[in-house]
Image (cartoon, rainbow, N blue to C red):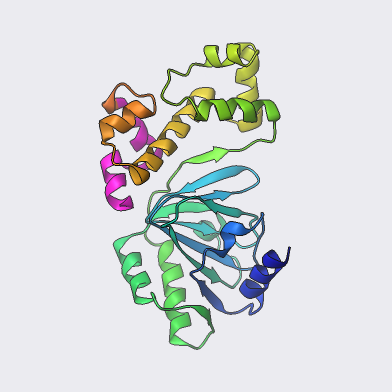
């Protein structure tokens, strides 16, 4: 694909430079990888990063660190989403930098990004911009922030894809393993095994993550209050919704809405 080749060439044509890109180019591409590590920052909505194994959900005011040569594909459906990509050269730094991870944008990182708001293109070693961006990269591992942990496993199993599609459309209902198995023409044991072998997660855990992801979307795209959002995604108890949200995101729903707005 010409667009794919153009992007990869633009990222990797200067192997030793740090590249800053503010266009949403990657959204139109199939799975690809770079010779450089990638810092992808999201503002104004939720982005979806697909890999061979999982779908990563990146809320507004969060970033994802993507190690070099890590196949991925970026997707989003919010028009007001703003994305910054910074591509870093160099050998593997180990630890934090060898793992895909999603983290909140701290006040310090936000200030540093504000300072670079007009930067675009390649910056080479010896320039003060290169040194500044290198410092920004090195800061990431020092902040010791908690990972944002909603990562939905994916599957190419057509039976399971159909079941998951049905679950997504019925999140406001009382979804149970027993009823889902019956509607799918399967035994409870077979459906349980299908989730465990194909997704490596339980039915209950998967539904919980689907609901919290939908809650994040509703916080961004609607004016519903927290009680209305909880009801919309199948919770009758606002406390249970808040606790599950905190368990998966390390934030209360009100905290998440505040940093995502």
Farthest-out residue, right: 1
At x 53%, y 23%, the residue is 203
How many numbered marks does the figure carry? 0
Identify which residue, 13 or 138, lies in the foreground: 13
Position in image of residue 105 (x %, y %): 36, 59
Q: Is residue 259 magenta?
A: yes
Name the spot of residue 25 as percent of width and height, x first.
57, 64
Whether residue 20 is in magenta: the answer is no
Looking at the rendering, the stretch of residues picked out in magenta corresponds to 240-261
Comparing 256 with 82, the one in front is 82
Q: Is residue 261 left or right of residue 142?
A: left
Is 57 drawn above or below residue 17 in the view shown? above
Considering depth in this image, is 31 or 29 the residue closer to the camera?
Answer: 29
Residue pushed farthest bottom? 126
Q: Can residue 252 be spotted in the picture? A: no
Q: Quadrant of the N terminus?
A: bottom right
Is 187 positioned to the left or the right of 126 in the image? right
Q: Is residue 218 above or below residue 125?
A: above
Residue at 69 percent of width and 30 percent of height: 158
Q: Is residue 259 visible?
A: yes
Coordinates of residue 148 in the picture (x, y in percent)? 42, 46
Q: Main secondary structure of the magenta part?
A: helix
Instruction: Locate residue 257, reporting x and y percent.
Output: 30, 46
Quadrant location of residue 238? top left
């Amino acid at each position: 694909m010409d667009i794919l080749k153009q992007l990869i060439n633009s990222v990797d044509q200067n192997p030793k430079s740090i590249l800053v890109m503010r266009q949403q180019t990657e959204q139109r591409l199939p799975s690809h990888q770079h010779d450089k590590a990638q810092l992808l920052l999201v503002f104004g909505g939720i982005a979806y990063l697909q890999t061979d194994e999982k779908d990563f959900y990146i809320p507004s005011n969060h970033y994802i660190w993507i190690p070099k040569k890590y196949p991925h594909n970026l997707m989003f459906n919010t028009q007001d989403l703003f994305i910054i990509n910074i591509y870093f050269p160099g050998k593997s730094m180990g630890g934090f930098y060898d793992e895909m991870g999603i983290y909140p944008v701290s006040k310090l990182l936000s200030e540093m990004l504000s300072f670079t708001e007009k930067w675009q293109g390649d910056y080479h070693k010896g320039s003060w911009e290169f040194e500044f961006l290198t410092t920004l990269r090195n800061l990431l591992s020092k902040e010791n922030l908690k990972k944002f942990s909603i990562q939905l496993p994916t599957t190419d199993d057509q039976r399971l894809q159909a079941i998951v599609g049905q679950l997504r459309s019925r999140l406001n209902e009382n979804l149970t393993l027993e009823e889902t198995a019956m509607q799918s023409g399967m035994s409870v044991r077979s459906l349980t095994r299908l989730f465990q072998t194909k997704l490596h997660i339980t039915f209950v855990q998967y539904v919980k993550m689907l609901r919290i992801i939908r809650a994040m979307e509703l916080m961004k795209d609607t004016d519903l209050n927290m009680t209305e959002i909880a009801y919309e995604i199948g919770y009758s108890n606002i406390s249970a919704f808040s606790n599950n949200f905190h368990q998966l995101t390390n934030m209360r729903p009100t905290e998440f809405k505040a940093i995502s707005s």
